Image (cartoon, grey):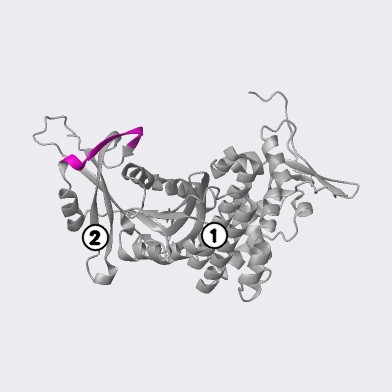
Amino acid sequence: MRVCHNISTVFDDPNLISHGGLPAMMELAEQAGLHGLVAEHVRVPGTAGANAAVKVSAVVAGMVTGADSISDLDVLRHGGMGRIFDGIRAATTLGTHLRGYTFGHIRQLDAVASRFLTSLAGCSPILSGADQIVFVDVDDTIRETHGYQKQGAAYGYSRVKGLNAQLAVISTPLSAPMIGGARLRKGNSASAHGADRLITDTLATLRRAVPGAALVVVRADSAYFNRDTIHAAIRGGARFSITAKMNPAVTKAIAAIKEDAWEAIQYPNAIFDQEQQRWISDAEVAEIEFTAFQSPVADRVTARLIVRRVKRLNPRHQDELLPGWRHHGVFTNNPMPLLQAEACHRDHALVEQVIADLKDGALAHAPSGKFLANAAWLVMATMAFNLTRAAATLASETLGRARTATIRRTLINVAARVANTARRWILHLPRDWPWQPQLENLIERLHPPPIPATT
C-alpha cells in the first residue's frame, strides 16, 4: 500500500474524536453504577478529593482507550470529546486526585471495584458457566520501575527493581478471566504476603456476583503453598489446588508412591518446561494422601497430593545408568478425577495472560512517585480491564475472549465525527469498518428496543 496523493495535515476539526467506541463503554459503566459507587464509597479529603466520582470515571475512561500514564489521560481532551462527555478533567487534575489517596481510601476504592464487578456480571455474561465451576487464580508480578524517587520500589524475587502487584483472577471454562481483586506491595514483598486477605475478599466478591456458584477452586503456584493461603480458601467455602513445594515431607510422600500406581498419559498439546527449556508431550501421574502443616495440630490439612513426573533428559545425550525423573506435586482437595484435576491445575497459567494484558495497557508503568497513588492506579486499571472485557462479551463471543489490545483496536479506537441533527446527537463512524456488526451489537444490547404495549 502506498500513499497516492500529496497530503497536508491540519488539526482543525472540533467535531472529530479518535475513540468512537468509548461512549458505549462508558454507558455500560454508567449502567453498572460506577459513578454512583464512587460517590457512595470514596471520601478523599480536600480539594484533591472533590468530585471523586467524576475523576475516577475519567481515569477509567482514559485507561480503556489505552492510557498508561497520568499525562496520557489528556487523550480525553481533544476534538468533540467535550460534546459527548461532561466532567472531563485535565491530566494534572487527575494526578492530583490520585496523590490524595491514603491506605484507607485505597480500601474504599477496592470496595468500589468489587461492587462494580458484581454489577457488570448482572449487565454482561462475563461469568457464564459459574453455576458449574469457577476458578480463582492468585499470582503476583513485578512492575519494573526506574529512578530513585519511586516509593516502595525494591529488588524482589526476580532481581528486578520495581513494585509488586498481586492479583486474584476469576474465570470459568466458558468465560474469559476477570480480575476479582488486586493489591500493590513493595517490590521486595514475599509472593504470598497478604494472599489470605486477597482470597477472602475475592471469594466474597464472587459469592455476591454469582450466588449460585457450585464448585470454586482456588489455584496458585508453590510460592503460595502455606497454611494461611489454604485455610483462607477453606474458610471461604472453596476448594484449593496449590503447587507443592518440594520440602522433605513432600519428597518423602512422593517416594512412598508405588511404581505400579503411576499412570502414563500423553498431553494433546505439549508443555514448555522453563527449567529444561524444552517441550514436554508425555508424562506419568499418580496421587497419594498427604497431610500438610503438621504443627500445630489445628492447622493440619489432609488432602490429595497429585504428582506428575517427567523423565529428566541428559543434556549431553549420554546413556543413563538409572532413569531420572522430575516431579511436580499439586496439593489439592479438588474432587475431580485424577487426570482431570491435574489438567485443571495446569490451567492456572491463564493468570499470566491477564498480567501480560495489564502490562500491555494501564500497568505499562507505575506512573507516580507516590506509592499510594500507584496503588489507586492499579485498582482503577482492574476496573478498566473488567469494563473492557464486559463490553467485548456483549459485542461478540469471540471478542469477549480476545486480548485487551484487540478489543481497543476493534471496538474503541475507531474515529468518529460528532453531529447534531434535529436535537439528536449522532456519531458518524467510518463506512466499511470491519467490526461494524460487533460494535452495533454492543450498542443494541445497551439500548434494547422497547417492549410493544399489549392491548
Residue at the far left in the pictured view: 321
- The quadrant in which residue 310 appears is top left
Left or right relative to 383: residue 88: right
Amino acid type shown at disc 1? Pro
Name the disc covering residue 211, or none.
1
Q: Which residues are magenta?
A: 260-271
Instruction: Report the side of 83 relative to 116 (left or right).
Output: right
User: Where 280 sits versus 126, above or below?
Assistant: above
- Image quarter in which the N terminus is found: top right
- Comparing 161 with 396, the one in front is 396
Q: Which residue position is annotated with label 2? A: 291
Residue at 57% x, 40% y: name it.
406
In the image, 217 versus 78, the foreground residue is: 217
Q: Secondary structure at mark 2?
A: strand
Prevailing SS of the magenta stretch: strand
Above/below status of 311 relative to 424: above
Residue in the picture at 66% in, 54% down:
74
How far is the residue under mark 1 from the one under mark 2?
31 Å
Q: Is 302 in front, or is 230?
A: 302
Q: Amino acid at mark 2?
A: Thr
Q: Is residue 390 magenta?
A: no
